[in-house]
Image (tube, rainbow, N blue to C red):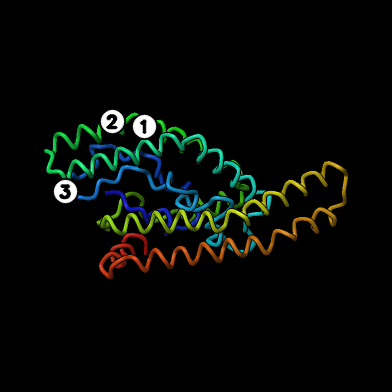
Amino acid sequence: MQSRVLVVLGAVVALVACDRSAPVGPANQSIDEVVDVVPDYAVSPAASIDAAGIGASAFPKELQLTAEQKAAIAALHDAFMKATAADVEALRALEREANAAKKAGKSREEVRAILAKATPILQRLDAAFKKLQADIWAVYTPEQRAWIEAHRPRACGPAALKLTDDQVKQIRALQEQFYEAVKPDLELIRSIAEEAKRARAAGKSRDEVAAILAKAVEPQHRVSDAEKKLQDAILALLTPEQRKLWACHHG
């Protein structure tokens, strides 16, 4: 089963350095484990680490995302989530159906037949996510891209964390609560970036534009602090053995 925490606990490089976009098809599902077909990146932008720069704390200070970059990435994630909402809900419905079939003692073939219906949906999400990855990559500066390329994770892909059903549910809830909590600050950052853009277009001075962008510093800090708390909360859900496996995979 693909781990919900792989992207959340990764650095900002996770989205672009690992090919996490490959859909979790029914063939990858173990019927003996929790049926979990909704991709982590579709749960919330938090799962993709860099919604509006979420996860940018991995960058060195001189490469931190600007307010404009954060606003641009937030807009990309919002568009992605709205465009894929129906498909994500369809996958959730298939998860519920498959898990109910398991509990009712249905055969492996019957459960797999349910999961097979997820394949075309996952393919659509995969294509949409690849476009999101490309669009976000275009937001980064050449220097930020070079840093990302130089700090690729040692290994990518599923880890053998074997999350329980309760862990999956709790991590999803944490991700969704996180995004709801930072939404006001993300919107504030976006509005400040738009204000700065209008000021530039109106011929305002560099100092005047900088003064506008300075208003984004505090909401940026709040988002970064919230992200760190999210990471700690998810780590706290893992067993010592799972944390050891995580450290082995990414340490």
Q: Residue at x 32, y 65 (%)?
A: 238
Q: Which mark is residue 32?
A: 3
Q: Which mark is residue 15?
A: none
Q: Position of residue 167 (x, y in %)?
A: 31, 59
Identify the residue position indicated by label 1 in the image.
121
Classed neighbour count for the residue bearing mark 1: other residues with Cα under 10 Å, few (<14), some (14–19), many (≥20):
some
Q: Residue at x 69, y 62 (%)?
A: 217
Residue 126 shows in the view:
no
Query: In the image, what residue type sits under mark 3?
Result: Asp
Query: Relative to the observer, which residue lies in front, 151 or 119?
Result: 119
Q: Helix, strand or loop at disc 1? A: helix
Identify the residue position indicated by label 2 in the image.
117
**242 to the left or right of 11:** left
- Mark 2–mark 3 Cα distance, whole angstroms, equals 19 Å
Dots 2, 1 in contact, CB < 8 A: yes
Query: As displayed, is residue 150 above or below residue 230?
Result: above
Check the picture and name the quadrant holding the C terminus.
bottom left
Q: Residue at x 88, y 44 (%)?
A: 203
Query: In the image, what residue type sits under mark 1?
Result: Ile
Query: In the image, what residue type sits under mark 2?
Result: Lys
